[in-house]
Amino acid sequence: MNSMKWVLFDRTQGAKTSDGSKLTADALTLMAKAVEAQINEEFAAEWGAQASIRVGASAKDIKPGEWAYIFVPTLPDAPGASAYHDITDKGVPYAFCAVTTCGSLFGRDGVSVDVSHEILETFGDEGANLYAYDNNGVLHALEMCDAVELQTYSKSAKGATQVQVSNWLLRSWFMPGAEGPYEYMTFANKPGGVPPHGPLKTAPGHGGNYQIVGKWTGATKDVYAKHAAYAAEQHIEGVRHKGMIPHWSSRTALRLAQMAHKDPTAVGLPADMRNFGQNRIARGQVGER
């Protein structure tokens, strides 16, 4: 069983969510308990995960083996994004959440949903660099929640407090040709579930649900292709609910750019690898963060 430990740190300095709520130690504790229950109950039954999540008392309150989830007012390095997960240069996972982009603490647009979303996705892809291949030339970032990120359900924390957490994908979603259901809420008959139309498909959504995908051409079908010259295009499929610019250091564009810089045989790599399809609101050169 994949066991992981998280510690939550409040660095919001009094910043508020859209409804005027401030993050507190008590609120973080409720989120920790709800997400911990989500992982150790239904998520563990599908993915074999186990988690312990606690609230850090100070910046130095992190123990060996723990991963930090840090709450800040905004994310200057990822404009418009609400949260992301990545790894340090030592290969240690971490996550950030910008509370001012959230509508509330515990609601469907709440901080708690971002906590659930990023922790679940780190379980699925600790290095933030894995992809599922559709056998038809497209790589799909191995993210547990993105394709159904608008959908949430309630988990109980202390007492009667209900905390919203993110919907997430089942194993069947990552397997071309597999039959559904493909996400937890439909599988568990929870209200509000919107199923994708098939494996590796984005669930229908109004202003949300998306995927980060990379299209590949060339002679290779190797997911871990050695040469970035095989990369044809990278883009977001769908409309990202909380900003169309994800944290690129953990995604296709920068990974491929790094490969190109290290690989002198990579000739003809497209100068623009941030094609957002119909949502062309941001473009940049290879290697730009």
Image: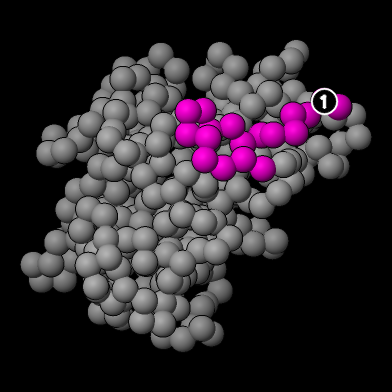
Q: Residue, x 20% and y 35% (percent of image)?
A: 193
Taking the image as shown, residue 146 lies to the left or right of residue 189, namely right
- Looking at the rendering, the stretch of residues picked out in magenta corresponds to 267-284
Q: Where is residue 127 in the image (x, y as percent from the top left)?
A: 59, 49
Relative to 125, is 115 above or below? below
Q: Position of residue 80 (x, y in %)?
A: 46, 54
Circle 1 residue? 268
Mark 1 belongs to which amino acid?
Gly
Classed neighbour count for the residue bearing mark 1: other residues with Cα under 10 Å, few (<14), some (14–19), many (≥20): few
Q: Residue, x 66% and y 43% (percent of image)?
A: 284
**Residue sticking out furthest to the right:** 264
Taking the image as shown, residue 90 lies to the left or right of residue 21, namely right
Q: Nearer the viewer, residue 114 or 75?
A: 75
Q: Is residue 237 visible?
A: yes
Q: Nearer the viewer, residue 80 or 193?
A: 80
Taking the image as shown, residue 272 lies to the left or right of residue 71, namely right
Residue 280: within the magenta? yes
Residue 188: within the magenta? no
